[in-house]
């Protein structure tokens, strides 16, 4: 499931072929994904210039010159593929459409962007740009973890008095937007905080230290995604999935990477999801 760094990698991959460019033709091959597509979506996209390509949490937002914004959510299995890129970055010819190619955007510059989603948990919607923040998916979101509103006083206040595990608190999209299971595990490891510790029982000093750690975990992953983008240019034009060396995620039974720790990474299940941590150095 793509998390914030993967979505940011997709956004950065799409930017050179979409931003400032006109959608010459939009092809919508089914009525819905997770939810129905908005009425006349293909017609409302055709001929529109993409003024800006933004990201909010795990949503990609394409602001169109019509005053509408195309919201794209990759869901569980959504993938973006670029072919026929005139910039010579994604040099592949347009492949034949595949079964799960649900939306195809042909840009005036010759690039084709294909949204493929076998499980169809993804979504697309069109909303007025001026009130985009009030969309039902966006209005509930807390601050962006890489933005200025996510800071030490905010996180200390959000954790104060909370009886939930810190893992759950960091997955709460009201507290911070876009953090998912993988990067919460990684951030708690770097911070030396046990994922089961109650959020309200962590000292303000340690909560404050989490803020730059969360930022750095995401920045590191986005940097890894950037290098994967360069690889994908020689591969198949698919954006957003990359091999990333995690410290704890998926490493149950393997030795802790912290020098002199000697611990073994463990896996527990919290709220139905796996948490990976080092019992020796996360307290
Ligand atoms: Zn350790």
Image (cartoon, rainbow, N blue to C red):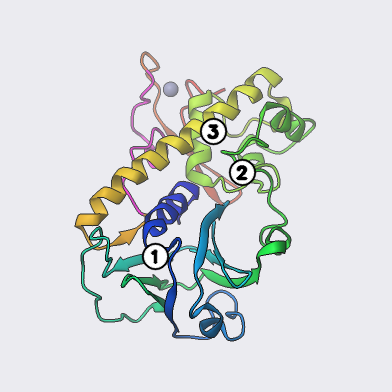
What residue is disc 3 on?
214
Label 3: few (<14), some (14–19) or many (≥20) C-alpha neighbours in 10 Å? many
Q: Is mark 1 in CB contact (under 8 Å) with mark 3?
A: no
- Which badge, 1 or 3, comes first in the chain's sequence? 1
Does 255 appear in magenta? yes
Instruction: Identify the residue shown where x is 72% and y is 55%.
Output: 140
Mark nearest the camera among 3 and 2 is 2
Position of the N terminus, as image quadrant, is bottom left
Q: Secondary structure at mark 3?
A: helix
Q: Which residues are magenta?
A: 241-258
Does 166 appear in magenta? no
Q: Position of residue 282 (x, y in %)?
A: 52, 24
Q: Main secondary structure of the magenta part?
A: loop
What residue is disc 2 on?
144
Label 2: few (<14), some (14–19) or many (≥20) C-alpha neighbours in 10 Å? many
What residue is disc 1 on?
79
Q: Secondary structure at mark 1?
A: strand
Picture quadrant where residue 165 is located: top right
Is label 3 within 8 A of ligand 1 (CB to nearest ligand atom)?
Answer: no
Instruction: Identify the residue shown where x is 60% and y is 29%.
Output: 211
Give the Cα distance between marks 2 and 1. Answer: 23 Å
């Amino acid at each position: 499931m793509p998390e914030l760094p993967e979505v940011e990698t997709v956004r950065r991959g799409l930017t050179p072929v979409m931003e400032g460019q006109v959608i010459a033709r939009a092809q919508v091959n089914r009525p819905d994904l997770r939810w129905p597509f908005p009425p006349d979506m293909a017609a409302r996209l055709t001929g529109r210039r993409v003024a800006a390509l933004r990201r909010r949490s795990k949503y990609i937002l394409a602001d169109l010159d019509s005053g509408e914004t195309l919201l794209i959510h990759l869901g569980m299995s959504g993938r973006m593929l670029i072919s026929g890129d005139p910039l010579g970055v994604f040099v592949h010819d347009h492949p034949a459409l595949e079964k799960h190619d649900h939306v195809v955007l042909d840009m005036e510059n010759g690039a084709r962007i294909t949204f493929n989603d076998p499980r169809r948990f993804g979504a697309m919607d069109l909303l007025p740009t001026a009130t985009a923040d009030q969309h039902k998916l966006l209005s509930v979101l807390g601050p962006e973890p890489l933005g200025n509103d996510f800071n030490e006083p905010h996180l200390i206040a959000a954790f104060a008095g909370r009886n939930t595990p810190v893992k759950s608190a960091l997955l709460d999209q009201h507290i911070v937007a876009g953090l998912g299971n993988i990067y919460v595990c990684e951030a708690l490891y770097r911070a030396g905080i046990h994922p089961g510790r109650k959020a309200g029982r962590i000292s303000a000093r340690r909560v404050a230290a989490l803020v730059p750690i969360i930022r750095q975990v995401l920045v590191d992953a986005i940097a890894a995604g950037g290098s994967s983008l360069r690889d994908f240019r020689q591969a198949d034009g698919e954006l957003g999935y990359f091999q990333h060396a995690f410290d704890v995620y998926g490493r149950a039974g393997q030795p802790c990477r912290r020098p002199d720790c000697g611990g073994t990474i463990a896996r527990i299940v919290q709220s139905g999801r796996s948490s990976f941590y080092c019992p020796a150095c996360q307290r």
